[in-house]
């Protein structure tokens, strides 16, 4: 019968007792081997626990005892091996004797043994199978022990050696199992995204709140820190000194004595108004067109596209372009003043027996779109930025004093949008600045009003006002200086809350004659020179000129001067 080859065929013969006993002995040997392996694993576990103990807690006397234990274990293994060899020899001898005895009695007891063996196999039909399978398992365990398990003494020695060094041999170190990363579910992903979005939203809101807090604080405290920063970032301006030489060619433009009423500009064209006609010239002094009139006291107002000519004290006006006449009108009452807006609206102020001032507004085609009457006399008329409204100042006597009132009209509304408190000055002009407040230039004081027309600040002049110019970002006032041939320029910034001027420029180079604002610059004509300043009060350019000039216009890096008889031109680079 072969071991591990399946169930053996039943031959009717009783198995040999020596063979069964050998299988039992093999099973016993396998059990011992398994126990030894188990003890070895226990010792290995103890070694691992000892290796985790710090070196300072170990006692040196333990190491020799471990070596003795390892030697005793090796000796015990040798003794067990010798006993197993002797026992195998005894079992082999017994099997041989039993086989001879069994052969002698085989013939005489064949029938009885067959019956007895049949009865025995009925009670235990799977005895041979169980023994055979058990032997196979034992054989496999023994083969595994021989191939994979190290000698117990060698294991003990290595364990002791690694106890000394405080480590565990790599061959006995079990690898740590890798954590298996679970794939998140769709719900978990959505929740994680929501949390991230909330965090970003909170951060954005917090950042916006911090920025808004500092911005509001900086705005309300600007009156403290803005003046300290003025001029720090400004680059030093270099003044350009022009030669002031009069251009030749078509210049000067000659007129009869006293015939030139006013000069102005429309785009890049020079406008000259005399008692008979309006002449239009290009930059080189060549006449391009002209329009005749028969007004007794003609006045010229111009924009970049159209020109308005009206008869002051009369009842006629006309609007012309650069090449043709747009329309003309004859009003019923005496014209006090008129003006034209960038969108071609025309405002005319008249009076009659019932009202001291009547404001009538016409569109670009001459149709009436707005009318307002007042019992007070109108002092000034200024269009707003888009031409859809205007600022009007009136004056009247109140309790024995003259007071002015500023009103702001929109032409699509019947009533004024803003009406100021009574102002104790003669309001020469009013307009809105970039800060949403109103500037009012009076004859004796400069005033700043809030959006409801209430007085915010007042600045009284130190001398007589010679001229002024207003822009949405800057207001400029010029006075004669205390000393001879001196001037004093005072500038107000729209972003400032100060009652005093933000910048004062004192000069001793001539008395002021006229001042105009154009393209963010101020050009001042004095008795012997012309100067150009920026809104910070820096002198950009200067040039000498004749003391006969009474008016001027600046465009295209040229200045055109008017005197009683002619118009001259000089190059004026700023």
Image (spheres, rainbow, N blue to C red):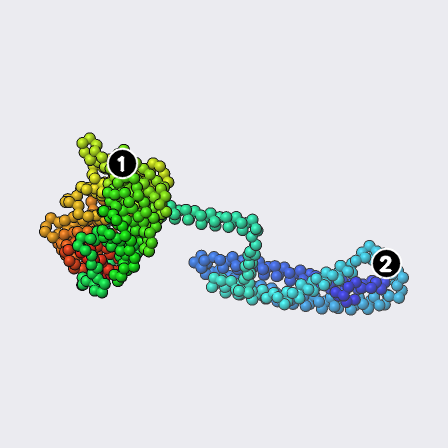
Q: Is residue 92 visible?
A: yes
Q: Name the residue at 23% across, 37% down.
A: 395
Q: Which residue is mark 1?
A: 352
Q: In terms of image quadrants, where is residue 124?
A: bottom right
Mark drawn on residue 118: 2
Q: Name the residue at 22% across, 51% down.
A: 275
Q: Is residue 108 left or right of residue 4?
A: right
Mark 2, other Cα within 10 Å: few <14 / some 14–19 / many ≥20: some
Q: Nearer the viewer, residue 502 or 144?
A: 502
Q: Position of residue 72 (x, y in %)?
A: 57, 64
Q: Considering the numbered disc 1 on the image, is that residue within a helix, a strand or a loop?
A: loop
Q: Name the residue at 30% across, 48% down.
A: 318
Quadrant where the C terminus lies? bottom left
Q: Position of residue 408 (x, y in %)?
A: 31, 40
Between the C-alphas of marks 2 and 1, the distance is 154 Å
In the rendered image of this protein, does residue 289 appear above or below residue 205? below
Q: Is residue 218 visible?
A: no
Q: What is the number of callouts on the image?
A: 2
Q: Nearer the viewer, residue 334 or 77?
A: 334
Mark drawn on residue 139: none
Q: Position of residue 310 (x, y in %)?
A: 27, 47
Q: Is residue 530 left or right of residue 57?
A: left
User: Mark 2 near mark 1, Cβ–Cβ under 8 Å?
Assistant: no
Q: Nearer the viewer, residue 349 or 64?
A: 349
Q: Residue furthest top?
A: 399
Quadrant where the N terminus lies? bottom right
């Amino acid at each position: 019968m072969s071991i591990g080859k399946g169930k053996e065929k039943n031959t009717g013969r009783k198995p040999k007792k020596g063979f069964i006993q050998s299988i039992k002995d093999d099973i016993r040997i396998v059990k011992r081997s398994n126990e030894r392996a188990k003890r070895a694993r226990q010792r290995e576990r103890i070694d691992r626990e000892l290796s985790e103990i710090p070196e300072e807690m170990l006692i040196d006397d333990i190491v020799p005892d471990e070596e003795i234990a390892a030697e005793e274990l090796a000796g015990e293994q040798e003794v067990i091996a010798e006993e197993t060899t002797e026992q195998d020899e005894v079992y082999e001898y017994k099997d041989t004797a039993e086989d001879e005895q069994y052969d002698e009695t085989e013939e005489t007891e064949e029938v009885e043994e067959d019956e007895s063996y049949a009865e025995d196999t009925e009670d235990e039909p799977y005895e041979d199978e169980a023994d055979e399978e058990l032997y196979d398992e034992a054989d496999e365990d023994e083969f595994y022990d021989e191939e994979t398990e190290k000698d117990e003494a060698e294991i003990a020695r290595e364990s002791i050696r690694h106890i000394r060094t405080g480590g565990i041999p790599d061959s006995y170190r079990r690898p740590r199992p890798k954590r298996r990363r679970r794939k998140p579910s769709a719900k978990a992903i959505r929740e994680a995204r929501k949390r991230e979005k909330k965090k970003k939203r909170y951060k954005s809101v917090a950042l916006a709140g911090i920025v808004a807090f500092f911005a509001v604080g900086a705005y309300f405290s600007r009156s403290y820190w803005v003046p300290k920063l003025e001029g720090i970032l400004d680059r030093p301006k270099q003044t350009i000194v022009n030669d002031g030489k009069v251009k030749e060619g078509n210049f000067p433009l000659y007129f009869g004595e006293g015939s030139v009423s006013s000069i102005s500009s429309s785009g890049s064209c020079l406008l000259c108004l005399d008692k008979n006609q309006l002449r239009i010239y290009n930059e080189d002094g060549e006449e391009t067109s002209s329009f005749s009139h028969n007004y007794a006291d003609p006045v010229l107002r111009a924009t970049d596209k159209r020109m308005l000519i009206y008869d002051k004290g009369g009842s006629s006006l006309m609007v012309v372009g650069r090449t043709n006449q747009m329309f003309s009108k004859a009003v019923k009452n005496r014209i006090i003043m008129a003006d034209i807006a960038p969108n071609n609206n025309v405002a005319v102020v008249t009076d009659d027996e019932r009202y001291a001032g009547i404001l009538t507004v016409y569109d670009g085609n001459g149709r009436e779109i707005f009318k307002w009457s007042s019992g007070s006399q109108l002092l000034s008329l200024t269009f707003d930025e888009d031409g859809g409204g205007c600022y009007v100042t009136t004056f009247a006597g109140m309790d024995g004093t003259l007071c002015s009132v500023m009103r702001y009209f929109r032409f699509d509304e019947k009533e004024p949008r803003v009406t100021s408190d009574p102002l104790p000055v003669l309001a020469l002009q009013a307009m809105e600045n970039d800060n949403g407040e109103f500037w009012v230039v009076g004859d004796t004081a400069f005033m700043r009003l809030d959006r409801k027309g209430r007085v915010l600040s007042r600045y009284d002049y130190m001398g007589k006002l010679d001229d002024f110019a207003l822009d949405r970002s800057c207001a400029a006032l010029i006075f004669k200086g205390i000393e001879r041939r001196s001037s004093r320029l005072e500038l107000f910034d729209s972003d400032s809350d100060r009652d005093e001027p933000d910048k004062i420029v004192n000069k001793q180079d001539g008395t002021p004659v006229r001042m105009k604002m154009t393209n963010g610059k101020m050009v001042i004509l004095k008795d012997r020179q012309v100067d150009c300043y920026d809104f910070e009060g820096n002198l950009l350019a200067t040039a000498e000129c004749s003391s006969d000039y009474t008016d001027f216009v600046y465009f295209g890096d040229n200045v055109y001067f008017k005197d009683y008889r002619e118009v001259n031109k000089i190059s004026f680079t700023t």
